[in-house]
Amino acid sequence: MKNLILLSWNIRGACSSVARRLIKEVLQENKISFICLQETKCGAWNNNLVDSLWSGQDNGWVEVKARGLSGGIFCSWNASIYSLERVQNTERWLWCVMKSRIEDVYFHIINIYSGQELQEKRELWIQLEQVARNNLDEPCCFVGDYNSIRDEEEKENCEFRRVDTIGFNQFIGNSNLLDLAITNSSFTWFGAGGKKSRLDRVLVNSEWWRKGCWKVSALNRRKSDHRPLLLRLDLVNWGPVPYKVYDIWLKDEMLLNALKTTTEMDNVNDGLNVQDLIRRIKSLIKDWSKDPKNNVGLRIKELECKITELENSQLQSNKIRELRMDLEDLYDQKISMLKQKSRVSWQLFGDKNTRFFHQIIQKRRSRNLVRKIFWMNSWITSPQDLKKAFYDHFSKTFQKKAQVVELRLGSIEVNKISLQEAEWLQKELTLEELEWALENLAPGKAPGPDGLNIGIIRTLWASLKKKTLECFTSFMSDGSLPVGLNSSFLALIPKVEKPKLVTEFRPISLINSTAKIFTKVLAEREEGFNYNISKEKFRWHIRDGNKVLFWEDYWKNDERLSITFNRLYALSRMKNVSVREFCNVWNCPETQVNKLWCRDLRAWELEDAVKLNEIINEVNLQQGEDSLVWRHSGKVFSVKDSTNFLIGEATRDGPEWKKIWKNKAPPKIQLFMWKLEQKILPTRVLLTSRMGNRISDLYCPFCRVLVETQDHLMWSCSFTKDVWGKVFDWWGFSNRFSNISNLQVWEWLKWCRNSSVQVCWGLSLLSTLWSLWLCRNLVVFERKNTDVNEVVWLIKVRAWKWAQACKMLSEFTRNLWDVNPIGAVLNSQRPSSVHIKKFVDASGYSDGAFKVLNNGVVKAGIGGFLKDKHQNLVYIFSGPTEALSPLQAEIKAFYCLIKAVEDSQWKEKNILFHVDSEEVLRFIAKIRAGLFLDQCSLEGDLVRFCQKSNYHFKHVNRSENSGADDLASQGLSRLQLIQGWY
C-alpha cells in the first residue's frame, strides 16, 4: 500500500471528451494508482475509454451504471500494482477488495455516492456500517461524496440540518472509522451564491491507519463543483514513537525468567543503579517483542490458517482442539492490549468488547493528531514546521526567568513546622515506605519515557527494590539522582475543543514510574503535617475516643486542654494518650495518683482538677470513629468562615451582596455577577498579572485599541457602548444613557418603581453583561465575528427566558417584549384570585357546542349567563351560531356574553368571566398583550372589551361550567338566539 495514490472525485459527468481529458491530466500530474469517481452519468464504460485515461497502462476497472443522466460510480486501478479479488455493489456504493502485487497485502476500498434524502442516507449508513464491522481486521477506506456534514462549521451560506448531522456522526462512531482531515481546504463543494460545504471525505479504519500516516489534500475544482481529493502516504518523519510495554507480555514465562535472571545478576554489580536496571529491562523486552514468534497478530493468523487446513480431517480433532485453545489465549492477549491502549475501565465494559476499545482508540488518535497550527501569521502543516513551532514556543517558556511574586500576609500569622518535624521529613527512607507507595499507585496509568507502568514495576519489584532503595536513600542524603531517572515526556492537552494556536495547548509532564513511587512517599510524609499546620481550625467530634489525643487535640471548646490546664498538663504522666485511655484511668480512683500525676496535687491545683472532672463527665463514649469537623459556624467549612478566622470580620463599601444572590437570574449568572463585583473576571490584563508574560496579546478583542481590562470590556469599549445604548433605548431610558459615565447596575434598578418591572429590568441588565462576556469568549476562542444587533437580540432572548421562568412574563408576550418590555410586564400581571373574588360585582359563564351530523352538516350553539355577587341570575342566553370549529364557537359564546355586559349598566362594574377552555384563555391573553389576531374575524370591539381593567378572567373546570355547557347544547336545537335580563 506504500505505492497507493488514490483520487476521489465527484466529476459531475465523465462521458464528454473534455471531462476525460481533465481526469487524464490529474492522473498524470499526481501519478495516481487508483481512481474513484462519483456521479459519472455514464451508461456504460468500455476498455477503450478507460485505456484513454491511463495512456495505455495496464489497468482494471468496475462500475455502477448511471440511471439516465444521474448517478454512476466508477473505480479503476493500475493493474501492474493491484489486482481485484472481489467486488460488490449497490446503486449507492461500490466495494472493491484489492490485493497489492508488491506487498502481498489485501485492502478494501468502498467508493460512495450518497443520495440527498434523509431516509436514503440512513439506509446507506446501515449498509456501510455492516461492511466496516465485518472487516475490522483488514484495511478499509471509505471515500466519496457523502452528501452530509459533521458539524455546522463544515458549511457556509447553506441550510444546516442537525438530524442529518447526528445520524452521520453516529455512523462514523459506530463503524470505528477515522475521519481524515483535508490539509489545505475546509470545503469540497462550492455552489451559487457563495455556498460552500464539505460533502466529500475519506474515512479509514484502524488497520488502514496502521499502514502509515495518510494525508488527504484537495486539488483544484476544474469543471466540477466538487474539489478532487487526493489520498496518499505522508512519508515525512514525525519523529520517534514513545515506547510502551504491554502488561500481557510479562505473562510470558520465558520473558519473565529472562528478566529475573538479568536483574538478579545486575543486582550484584555495585556499579549499576536502578536506572541502569530499567534500561536493561527495556532493552530485553524490546528485543523480545521484535521477534515474529511473539507477535500476537501474526500468531493469530498462523493458527487460523492451520485450523482451516485441519478442519476437514477427522483424525486431527485433538490437534484442532489444542490449536483452538491456543487461539483463544491469543485472542485474550490481543484484547488485553486493546484495553491497555484505550485506557478505559475493563470491568465496566466487559472482557470481549473489542469494538468498543477500537472505537476509543480511534477517537483518541483523531483527537491527538495535530494537523495544522497557525504560527507566525500563516498556517503550517508539515511535521518539521509543526515540531519546530512547538519546540520554539515551549523552549522560550521554560527558559524564562521565574517571575518573583512578593506574597504579603500582613498581620496574619501562619503555623510552621518545628525543627524536629523538619528533620523527620528528611529522615532516611525505608523499604516499607516504598512498598506502600507502590501498592497505592494505579497500575495502568500512562508511563513516562522508560515505557514501564506501575503494574510492570510491581511484577519485577523483587529484583528492583534493592537498587531503588539505594537510589532514593542517596538522594535524601546528597540530593543526586541517576541521569534519566527524573526525565519526563511533555504531553500537550488542548485547552479548547479545536485548538489552532500553540498557546491553546496545556503541557503536562509524564514522569517515569520509579520517580512516581518516590513522589508518593514524599506526599505521604507531608500529609500528616498538613493536619498539624491547620488543626487549630478544626475540632474533633468524639465517638469512641480512640483517635483523639486528650491533651493536644482540639475537641473541647476552642482551646487545647494542654493550654487551658497547663499546670495539670505539666504534672501529667499521660501526655500522649487518647481520650478513651485518659477517661478510663480517670474513672478508676485507686490508680489516679500512680498513673495520672507525677506527685500529689496542691490545693490550688485541685481547683483545676475539679473543672477537668466536669469536662470528663460530659464525655459520652460510644461506638463509631472520631471525626474532624470545622470549628466555626455550622460545623461545615466555608471560605467566608476561613477568611474571617484569618483576618476577622471586614467591613467595606462594596456592592449590595443581597441583590446579587437574591435576584431572579440563574445561579451561574449570580456567580458571574459576584466575580464582576469582585473585579476578578479573567480578562487578559488580570491573567497577565497572575501568569506573567505568557499572554502576548493584551488588546480588547472588540475594539483592538485599548488593553482588555474589566471596566473597559464591560463599559468603555466602543462596541460595548453601542450595545448598552441599544439596550437603554429598548427600555425607553435613552435620555438617561448620555449622562452615564460608568457601570452602575444597582443604581439603575431604582429607575423602575413597579416591583415586577424592576425585576425584569434587572434581568435585562444582567443578560447584557453575560451576553457581552459570552461574545468576548467567542471572539477570543473561536474567532467569531461580532455584531451589535445579534448581541442585542440574544440579550432580549435570554432576559425573556429568565423572566418567563420566574413567571414574570406570559408566553404570549414574546413579540411585545422585543419592542416594549415594560408593556409586556404589565400585560403579564394578573390580580390574585383572592383579590378578584373580594371585589367582584358579578360573575359570567359562557360555553360553545359544536357538532358534525352524519350528512356532513355542521351545527354550533352558544350559551351562558351572568350572576351578581349574591348569586342571583342577572342575564341568560342560548341559541345557534355559525362556526367552523369548537374554538370559534366558544369564542363567539364569550363575545356574546361580554357584548351583552357592555350594552348594560354592568359595563363599569368588576366582572369575573369564567372560561373552561385553555385555548380561549390563551386567545384572550393574546388580545390583552396586543398581539395580532388571526384566529377569528369578530368585531373589532372585542379587543377593546378584553383590555378593560375592570374585566378579569379565570380558568375553571368543565364541571364548574356545566350550566353554560347545558345552555350551549340546547342552542344546537334552537332556531334563533334567546336572551333575557332579570
Image (tube, helix red, strand yellow):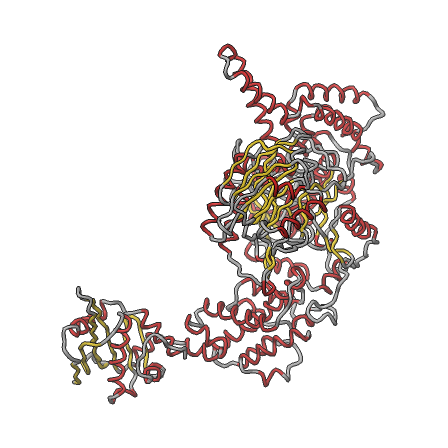
Decide: is 982 above or below 922.
Answer: below
Front-most of residues 41 and 243: 41
Decide: is 678 above or below 876.
Answer: above
Farthest-out residue, top:
315
Place of residue 180 in the rendered image (x, y in percent of width and height, measured from the top left):
64, 46
Place of residue 470 in the rendered image (x, y in percent of width and height, measured from the top left):
79, 29
Q: Is residue 293 left or right of residue 72?
A: right
Q: Residue at position x 76%, y 33% from top?
A: 429
Q: Residue at position x 73%, y 65% from top?
A: 685
Decide: is 652 above or below 483.
Answer: below
In the rendered image, the quadrant that contains the C terminus is bottom left
Place of residue 969 in the rendered image (x, y in percent of width and height, measured from the top left):
17, 71
Q: Is residue 553 left or right of residue 171?
A: right
Place of residue 223 in the rendered image (x, y in percent of width and height, measured from the top left):
63, 56
Q: Residue at position x 59%, y 33% from top?
A: 84
Front-most of residues 514 and 902: 902
Q: Is residue 318 left or right of residue 16?
A: left
In the rendered image, the quadrant that contains the N terminus is top right
Q: Quadrant of residue 439?
A: top right
Q: Residue at position x 67%, y 67% from top?
A: 679
Front-most of residues 787 and 140: 140
Residue 294 appears in the rendering: yes
Q: Quadrant of residue 269?
A: top right
Residue 571 appears in the rendering: no
